[in-house]
Image (cartoon, rainbow, N blue to C red):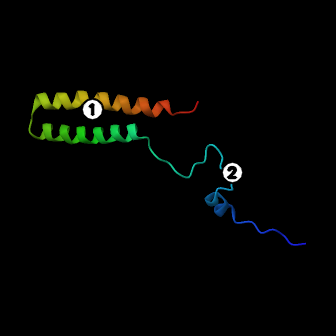
């Protein structure tokens, strides 16, 4: 009788033969919308720092309002993916 050789469990996942549990995903890709909001938050922070540096009050207020809106969007998007 010959025994059938199987690949190591790590290789079985790579070949698509292994079962991965729902909670364990080896690839974590952010959604496109969430990435775009992160980029907009970063750009807004740069604008806020430039406005503060030049003491431009209207631009500072506009940047703060936009940052408030973008952070609200980001955390709304993050909380919609939570599992209860």
Q: Is 45 situated left or right of 26 in this image?
A: left
Q: Is 18 situated left or right of 26 in this image?
A: right
Residue located at (25% from left, 29% from top): 66
Which quadrant would the C terminus be assigned to in this image? top right
Residue located at (27% from left, 32% from top): 67
Residue located at (48% from left, 30% from top): 80
Residue located at (17% from left, 28% from top): 61
Residue 65 in picture, x, y percent from top left: 24, 27
42 or 18: nearer the eye? Answer: 18
Compared with residue 82, is residue 14 higher up or lower down, i.e. above or below? below
Q: Is 7 situated left or right of 40 in this image?
A: right
Compared with residue 12, is residue 58 higher up or lower down, i.e. above or below? above
- Secondary structure beneath dot 1 equals helix
Among numbered discs 2 and 1, the one appearing first in the sequence: 2
**Dot 1: within a 10 Å radius of its alpha carbon, few (fewer than 14), some, or many (20 or more) residues?**
some
Residue topped by disc 1: 67
**Dot 2: within a 10 Å radius of its alpha carbon, few (fewer than 14), some, or many (20 or more) residues?**
few
Residue 13 in picture, x, y percent from top left: 64, 57
Where is residue 49, by image quadrant?
A: top left
Residue topped by disc 2: 19
Number of marks in the rendered image: 2
Which quadrant would the N terminus be assigned to in this image? bottom right
16 or 48: nearer the eye? Answer: 16
Judged by depth in the image, the label closer to the viewer, 2 or 1, is 2
């Amino acid at each position: 009788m010959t025994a059938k050789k199987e690949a190591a469990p790590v290789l079985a996942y790579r070949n698509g033969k292994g079962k991965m549990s729902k909670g364990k995903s080896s690839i974590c890709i952010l959604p496109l919308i969430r990435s775009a909001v992160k980029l907009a938050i970063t750009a807004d922070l740069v604008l806020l720092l430039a406005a503060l540096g030049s003491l431009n009050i209207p631009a500072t207020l506009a940047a703060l309002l936009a940052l408030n809106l973008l952070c609200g969007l980001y955390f709304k998007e993050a909380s919609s993916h939570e599992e209860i």
